[in-house]
Image (cartoon, grey):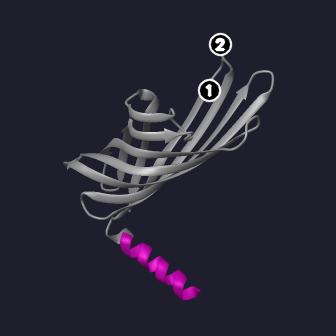
Amino acid sequence: MKKITLFLFMMLAAMAVKAQVYAGGSLGFWYDNGDDGGVETTTFTISPEIGYNLNSKWAIGVALGFSHITASDETKIKTTGFAIAPYARFSFYENKMVRLFIDGGFGFSTVNSDVTKTIDGIEVGFKPGIALKLNEHFSLVGKVGFLGYRDDYISGADGQGLLLSSEDLSLGFYYEF
C-alpha cells in the first residue's frame, strides 16, 4: 500500500511540475427577502473543479457541485443538491492574457427536498468560456450559456437548445500548479 501511495504522489508531483494540473471553482450566495410577494429564499452554491492540460489546446476535468436552498414561508423547506460533471475542454484562441474555450461534457445530479422525493437529473452539452490570466498561476474564469440537453438537472431549465442568459453565468478562479 505504501508503494502505491508513493507512486500516486510521485505522479501528481510530476504533473504539477509541468504546470499541467489546475484547480479552482466558483462560490455563490443569494438571498431573496420575498418583498415582491415571493418566498424568502437563501441559496448557497459551491462548485470545485479540477483538470489536467493534455496540451495547449485540450484539457480534461471534472466539476463537482453542491447547492443548498432554504425557502421560508409558513414552513422552512430545505433542498440540497449534488452534481458531478466530467468534461473535455477545447481552447480555440489564446494570447498572453486571454483564452477562449468550450467545454463539452455530461453531468449527473441528485436533488433532495423536505417535501418531494429525490430527483435525479442529467445534462449533455457544451459551455463556452473565457479565462483571463492574471499571472503565471492564477486565472479568472467565466462561463456563460449552455447548448445541449437537460432533464431535471441541478441547475438550468429542462429541455434542449441554446441558453445565453445572465442566469446561466458562472465566475470563478483557477490555480495552475
Q: Which residue is mark 2?
A: 35
Q: CA distance from mark 2 to mark 1?
A: 11 Å
Q: Is residue 23 above or below residue 130?
A: below
Q: Residues within 10 Å of mark 1 (few under 14, many from 20)?
A: few
**Residue 27 screen position, x and y as percent:** 53, 41
Dividing the picture into quarters, in which one does residue 80 lie?
top right
Q: Residue at x 44, y 38 (%)?
A: 170
**Residue 70 screen position, x and y as percent:** 70, 32
Q: Residue at x 61, y 37 (%)?
A: 44
Q: Main secondary structure of the magenta part?
A: helix
Which dot marks residue 31? Answer: 1
**Residue 53 screen position, x and y as percent:** 33, 62
- What's under tag 1, amino acid-wise? Tyr
Left or right, residue 55 beside residue 146: left
- What segment carries the magenta color? 1-15
Q: Secondary structure at mark 2?
A: loop
